[in-house]
Every structure is written in C-alpha cells, then in structure tokens.
Image (cartoon, rainbow, N blue to C red):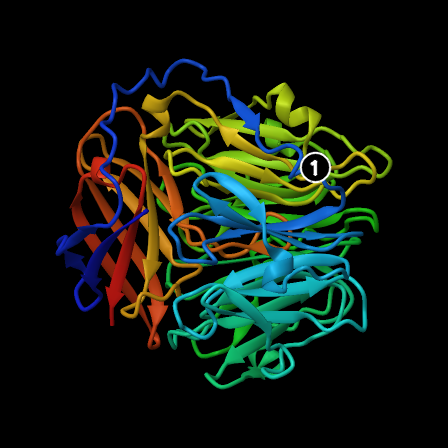
Amino acid sequence: MKVWVRVSSRAVALLLLTVLVVSCEAEHPGQAPNDNRMLQPSFRSIQTDLFNAQGAQTNAWADFDNDGDLDLFVGFRGRPNRLYRNDLGTFVDVAGAQGLADEEETRASAWGDYDGDGDPDLYVGFAAVGIGNRLYRNDQGSFVDVAAQLAVDQSGTTRQPTFVDYDGDNDLDLFVAFRDRPNILLRNDGITFSDVTTSSGIGDTRRTVGASWFDMDGDADLDVFIANQNGDEDGFFRNLGDGTFEDVAVALGMNQPGRSEDQGSVGTAVSDYDNDGDLDLFLASYGPDVLWQNQGDGTFTNVAPGTPLAGDHHSVSAAWGDFDNDGWVDLYVGTFLAGEPEARDYLFRNVGGVFTEVAPDTLVARGASHGVAWADFDADGDLDLALANNHDPEGTHPLYRNEIEPTRSSRSLQVAIVNNDGVWTRPGATVTLRRESDSYVSSRVMDPGGGYASQGMTPVHFGLPAGGGSLTIAVSWFEGGERRTSIVSDVAPEVFRGRWMLLQLDP
C-alpha cells in the first residue's frame, strides 16, 4: 500500500517527477464534515482474545515482512514477547516462528534498518542487569541475533533505544538510554558499531527513562532531549554537527531543577501541536506534565500550566496523533499507579492549539500503563491505537480500531522517507506539509523514539482540515555535514488514499 515519489536533494524546489501506484484504486473522497463541531472519538477493541495477555510494556510498529501493512512488536514482563503479523487487518502472533519470543523481561524496542538491506531490524532491550540486549537482523522476514557480533550487546536497565543517523553519513547509528548506567551512542561503521559515547559527550549519567531525537534548532542535524527520573534534572544535548554534543538544558531553562526523588520526566513525545512549522515536546511526568512549545529560535517555553495538559497524573507515556483528521495533532497520555491496574488514561483533543479531554469509556476501561503507539494498521487513513498495560492480573494490551466516519478518516496523507536505495535511513527527519488554498501548515518528525521506550518504522501521518487544494511537502535532514531540503509540489492527496506516499531522496 505504497506510492513511490522519486525526488532529488540537489535542489531546494522540486517538482513531482514520477508516481507509480502499486496497489488497488483509491476510494473516492467524500464531502468533508464540519470541523467546527465537537467530534466524539470512536474506538473499537479488536481480536480481544489475542490482545488480552498481561504484562505488556513496550510496543512498536513496522512492516517487518515488507507486504505493505504495519505489524506490531510487543515486549512483555512475565511471558514471551510477541510479534503480530498483520494479514489484511487481522493479526497473528508469529514471534515463536521468527525467533523473537524472548522470555526475559523486555522494557525497550526499536525498529531500524541498520544494515541498509531494505527490511526492518529489531533491537530489544531488557530490564535485568547481566542480560545482554539483542539486535535481531531481519533477513527477508527471518530474524537472527547479531548483537554480540556487532558489539551492541550492552547490559543494563534499558529504557529508550533509538536508531538515528546522528553524523549524517547515511546509515543508522544506535543510541541507548539506561536507568542504571550512562547512556551510550554506538556509531555504525558498516561492519560493526563503535562506542563513541565519550568522544561525543552524550553519555548522560543520570537515571534516564525517555529520549527523543529531533531538530530542535532548525539546523537539520538531530539533537536529543533526555528525560530523567528520581529527581534528576533533564538534559537536552544539542548536536554541534561535528560528532559532538553539548547539554544546553540548563541554558535553555529546560532542566527542571529541584524535583523530589519521587518526581521526574518519563515519556517524551514530539510533534507540531500549534501548526507553526516547528517541533514541540511533551513530557509525561511523575509530577505535573510539561509541554515545551518551540519558539522557533532554539528556545522553548512550558505552556502547559493553566491548561488540561498540566495534570499531575503520574504519567508514564505519551504519543501525538491526529485521531480525528482535523489537521491538529491530538495527544494520548498513559498513566501508572501501583495497585491500580486500570488507572485512567487521557485523550486530549487539540482544536486550534486548545486541548479538551475526550477519552471515551472504551479507552478509560482498558488503558495503558506503559506502551502507547498510534498507526494506521488498516490503511483507511485514520490512526488506530495500540496500548500496553503491564499490570497483573488485569492489565492487557488492547488494539483499538479508529472508527470515525469514512469521509473524515480518508482525509489524510501519510509520508515515508527513504534514500536512493529505498532504505529507511531518515528517522528524525522533519516533514512539513503546506496547503496554499488556506495557508495551512504543519510539521511532523519521522519516528525518533517515544511512547514508552519504543521506536517504530511508520510513515508520518497528517490529518487534513476541511477544504481542498494541492499540497507541498518539504523534507529536511542532515547529510554530508550540511542541511538538505527537498520540496515536492502539487501533491494531490486523493491519489494517496489508502496508501503511503513514499518519498525517495536521491543524494
């Protein structure tokens, strides 16, 4: 379910060159509903017997078998991990057959094509000290652990792993955050990985739980925000473009000093909530949650106080997703309270940058204590929701199908970025959509890690506000020591209904 669009990065302004439709005919778009009315979210739990197991923690989407739809990995505590293969909207657990049914407590997972062969590989991080993390190389749908061979079998209380091209050399490096030891950065050297933690200056020694990579200052290279727990201050490591990083959290006033031992930042979520074209950051926290609004000049302001987003919910995870396709990205926040398996979660609907809590009873009844991951698994244009609750005996890991009306669900565009060889090497790239007819603009970031200690390989999703007109898509990334930008003009979103727009960037 993909449409290929080949562009070149040699120029800034480019035209659509070729479009190859490789799936069924697109459905005809319907009349857009009135965006001014309050749309009530509608989610339906599917395959409840399959998604009923307790102990789920990390969850991440990727098309591991390259059949054009998204599959789901779920890591567990107290039972083997699962890999749910998506067969036209119906899921089957194939982890045992694929060699991914690890029984050690799994806290973290990240999909990324580290070897550049065109299929997603999987990094799995464990909770216990003394168990080496695993990197499963994907060989056309079959997996083999190569962590020891590639010197990435790190051990520790693992939290957020992320595949990113921090140095702009067109391959994926590996960052891993830990709760009990310094975070590490492993540079991809083609044959193996080299530990560049010390030379890069990125080895935060505080108790890290969450991390998100994105371009915080508009220079296209990837910076990383570090969310720290147990009263530790947060870090924000600016990429200096020469292989080194500088922690600027204190200088930016984003370190949150003076928190008590039972407070701290946990989950991170990045998106453009205010539709001004730059990327903002939400922190799910033990203590009041935080929304860092990007001021467009490399500085950030906490705009959560006085809004519903500033609640003290003992929040663990969060994920942005425009569930109602109105062009304003909404926010799901998962909470954890010991002894309360079904402590309620929150779904904040964003209308014009103003948030209202709208979680339906279905989500409140079976929420998340940990993993939160949006994805359009059924290719109808709207975002579905996978949750993970690790509580025994009541916690489950439900998958909810989004059932908003079809005329609205189809009003979206999903964009993935690959290199000249068709390989996903752009996690963290900024994708900006503009519509000239009404000056609508919004930005997204290719999955940089978030939810709960998870990283997927999914296209960025744009809901489109009511109205029509062609779109312009701009992609910015860091390569060869400089900022690269490609622009695709005259994009007709109806061409891509039911499929991804896959942008192939030539060097």
Residue 428 or 256: which is nearer the viewer?
A: 428
Could you say whether the residue bearing mark 1 is in a helix, strand or loop?
A: loop
Describe residue 12's horizontal placement relative to residue 37 as left or right.
Answer: left
Question: Which of the 4 image quadrants contains residue 35?
Answer: top left
Q: Residue 415 at what x, y percent from top left? A: 33, 49
Where is residue 211 drawn, in percent x and y?
60, 57
The residue furthest front is 97
Q: Residue at x 49, y 86 (%)?
A: 191
Position of residue 417 in the picture relative to residue 353 (left or right): left
Q: Residue furthest right?
A: 339
- The residue carrying mark 1 is 52
Residue at point 45% right, 67% down? 140
Residue that appears at 52% across and 61% down: 111
Q: Is residue 460 above or below residue 505?
A: above
Vertical order, 1 against 361 (above or below): below
The answer to whether residue 233 is seen in the rendering is no
Point out residue 126 in the picture as x, y percentages from the top left corner. 73, 63
Q: Examine the image and state in which quarter residue 175 appears.
A: bottom right
Q: On screen, 237 above or below 385?
A: below
The C terminus appears in which quarter of the rendering?
A: bottom left
**Position of residue 24 measured from the top left corner of the image (x, y, whole percent):** 25, 41
**Horizontal side of residue 438 vs 422, given as left or right:** left
The amino acid on which the numbered mark 1 sits, given as a three-letter code, is: Asn
* Residue 126 in the figure: left or right of residue 430: right
